[in-house]
Image (spheres, coloured by chain):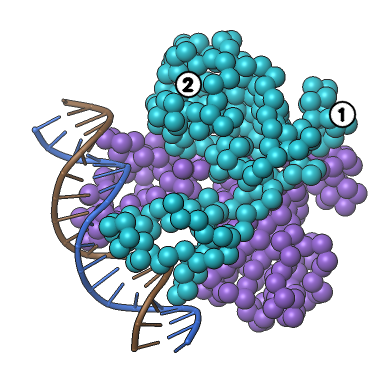
Chain colours: A purple, B cyan, C brown, D blue
DNA sequence: TAGTGGTCTAGACCACGGT
DNA sequence: CCGTGGTCTAGACCACTAG
């Protein structure tokens, strides 16, 4: 496993092809992914450069919180995964087949250092994930757990973003004034398991840590 | 120019290859772009389906306002493009070479129907875009104008999203109460013209029209 | 089984950057 | 000039969906 410091040039695409005995197509597909995720920048005629990582929470189009942010991130469970009823006011209403299955819910509070910055609620069908309870999260990441323990990958995500005033609960949790502006992000994650969609509701205090996003067109 | 209604299946990838005398690689690259932009959904073993368009402002990872939203979108110029000084508090500080060139600025207010929903400010170097003044915008789209009139394309964008309280100016423009929560999106667009970056600041009233986003991993 | 999308190999030509 | 990334052709095998 090679390591390349930020700003340095990676081996050329042709070189990578030779090293790993793969073709340009495959090499470029992998590199393009790194570019989309913001890890690598390409410079035509020069090479591919490792990008300086941004400090802001690289959420949005990126997978999970714990992968997106570097160090100093802590997570506290407000409610561990448990069976419940499907709520009424879910963003991106679930499909009928899902509503016929039991609903698993969990709720977490995410910190950067000592500051709570995000309140996260998650709902999903318990059917494809039988026996999912307790905090058996790998590295604190729900998505990593899905991937490694259940071989389920996120395929697409749909998001909706609003600004709103913190209500009683959110102001208490995020340690901010009631009515302070916060970000509400509603997400529907689709997964490689057709019966499994994950519905997430995020409330973010963006005062100190804005949400970041990088995109290559 | 064929048209396919929402929900219908497109011709298969192999079929498109035959029709246009191109290879799978090329076909798939084009389709993947449509998938990333949220226009098409692929279903393995079945085909590629035209996606039902979302109502929310499909901004973020999508190009411009006027392409993103369907009908009923109007735009009013608060300040037409004109020369000015580079501001101090720009998001994603410009590079030294840019600061040595004159700065062009324009400011618009965007409506859906009769509701102002977004206040937009844009700064960029006047050097690569000599003679850019007046409202010579194609279809009201700055990016379409760049593309068609100057052959300049957006290559990457970096965004930062915050929630904040509307100040006097924003509350006046967006016709909302002072202190109401609004979305602030700071963007740096890089373009195919190396000397041209576009710095944009968006303030959105997300009460009625949230910001949308679709992503394929 | 036939057709679909997902992935890959092999190899070509081009425009761009630095020497 | 050579090496880089950008794009493309040609063709293969696979897993999945549906009749």
Residue furthest to the front: B1
Q: Nearer the viewer, mark 1 or mark 2?
A: 1
| Residue placed most toward the observer, D9 or A75 | D9
The vertical placement of B113 against B25, above or below, is above
Q: Could you tell me which secondary element the residue under label 2 belongs to?
A: loop
The vertical placement of A197 against B66, above or below, is below
At label 2, counting other C-alpha atoms closer than 10 Å, the crowd grade (few under 14, some 14-19, many 20 or more) is few
Classify residue B17 as left or right of residue B59: left
| Separation of marks 1 and 2 at Cα, in angstroms | 34 Å
The vertical placement of B193 against A80, above or below, is above
| Residue placed most toward the observer, A30 or A217 | A217
| Quadrant assignment, res A66 | bottom right
Residue at the spot 75% in from the left edge and 69% down from the top edge: A105
Label 1 lies in what chain?
B
Residue at the spot 84% in from the left edge and 42% down from the top edge: A165
Both marks 1 and 2 on one chain: yes
Q: Position of residue A76 (x, y in %)?
A: 74, 58
The vertical placement of B53 against B204, above or below, is below
Identify the residue under disc 2.
B95
Q: How many marks?
A: 2
Residue at the spot 88% in from the left edge and 52% down from the top edge: A169
| Quadrant assignment, res A139 | bottom right
Classify residue A1 as left or right of residue B120: left
Residue at the spot 34% in from the left edge and 41% down from the top edge: A48
Which callout, 1 or 2, points at the residue further toward the start of the chain? 2
Q: Could you tell me which secondary element the residue under label 1 belongs to?
A: loop
Q: Position of residue A129 (x, y in %)?
A: 64, 78
Identify the residue under disc 1.
B178
Label 2 lies in what chain?
B
At label 1, counting other C-alpha atoms closer than 10 Å, the crowd grade (few under 14, some 14-19, many 20 or more) is some
């Amino acid at each position: 496993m090679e390591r390349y410091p930020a700003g340095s040039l990676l081996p050329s695409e042709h070189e990578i092809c030779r090293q790993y005995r793969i073709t340009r197509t495959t090499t470029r597909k992998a590199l393009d992914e790194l570019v989309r995720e913001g890890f690598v920048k390409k410079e035509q005629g020069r090479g591919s450069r490792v990008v300086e990582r941004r400090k802001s929470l690289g959420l949005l189009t990126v997978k999970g919180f714990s992968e997106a942010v570097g160090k100093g991130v802590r997570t506290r469970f407000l409610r561990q995964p448990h069976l419940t009823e499907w709520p009424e006011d879910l963003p991106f209403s679930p499909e009928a087949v899902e509503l016929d299955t039991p609903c698993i819910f969990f709720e977490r509070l995410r910190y950067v250092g000592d500051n709570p910055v995000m309140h996260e609620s998650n709902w999903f069908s318990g059917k494809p994930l039988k026996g999912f309870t307790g905090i058996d999260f790998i590295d604190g990441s729900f998505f990593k757990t899905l991937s490694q323990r259940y071989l389920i990958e996120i395929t697409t995500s749909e998001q909706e973003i609003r600004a709103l005033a913190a209500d009683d609960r959110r102001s208490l949790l995020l340690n901010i004034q009631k009515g302070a502006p916060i970000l509400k992000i509603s997400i529907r994650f689709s997964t490689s398991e057709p019966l499994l969609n994950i519905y997430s509701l995020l409330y973010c205090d963006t005062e100190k840590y804005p949400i970041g996003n990088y995109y290559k067109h």
